[in-house]
Image (cartoon, rainbow, N blue to C red):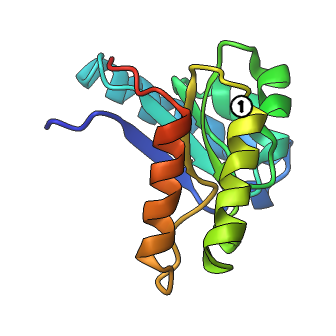
Amino acid sequence: HGAGAFQLFDSWAGSLSRVDYERFVLPHSRDVFRELAIRHPNVPGIHFGIGCDHLLEAMLAAGPRIIGLDWRTPIGAARARLGTDTIVQGNLDPALVLAGEEPALAGARAVLADNGGHPGHIFNLGHGVQPDTDPAVLAAIVELVHEHTQVVAP
């Protein structure tokens, strides 16, 4: 109903071994992405989990167009494993945002550098925004990202 994308957010997948993820979770995640692709063929799906570095290939096998990365997985390393054409979302450490504007901006610059100007990157926190986050810090990050990237319309 007008969404530009959808995200399957699995907070606990990272606590599973790859074998358990593939056995107990992957079939259901695959069903979600398959069904939503049928119902909304032009809406890209994002698959994101916390602590899922060891599961990235399996998560991609579920069928998303985009893989979300938490702050512990370097973008370059993820693309080396998943393919250079893989679109990724992430992955600023949310703790840096709580540390203030300068640490947050330094972290944002590091994320942009790790991406290396690749067009298939959606800048985002590598998890959620904490309730006590200063909105001015978030605004400074958005400004920095806009200064250093180009938004490409679908």
Q: Nearer the viewer, residue 87 or 104?
A: 104
- Which residue lies under the disc numbered 1? 115
Residue appearing at x 76%, y 21% in the figure: 82
For this orientation, the residue located farthest to the left is 1
Amino acid type at image mark 1: Asn
- The answer to whether residue 86 of the structure is visible from this angle is yes
Residue appearing at x 64%, y 37% in the figure: 26
Element assignment for label 1: helix
- The answer to whether residue 92 of the structure is visible from this angle is no
For residue 45, what is the image quadrant? top left
Q: Is residue 131 left or right of residue 101?
A: left
Q: Residues within 10 Å of mark 1 (few under 14, many from 20)?
A: many
Q: Position of residue 132 (x, y in %)?
A: 50, 87
Q: Is residue 21 above or below residue 38?
A: below
Q: Position of residue 105 (x, y in %)?
A: 65, 59
For residue 85, what is the image quadrant? top right
Residue appearing at x 53%, y 30% in the figure: 30
Q: Nearer the viewer, residue 6 or 32?
A: 6
Quarter of the image that includes the N terminus: top left
Residue appearing at x 60%, y 61% in the figure: 127
Q: Nearer the viewer, residue 21 or 134?
A: 134
Q: Is residue 139 left or right of residue 114?
A: left
Quarter of the image that includes the C terminus: top left
Q: How many marks?
A: 1
Q: Position of residue 88 (x, y in %)?
A: 61, 32
Q: Position of residue 68 (x, y in %)?
A: 60, 41
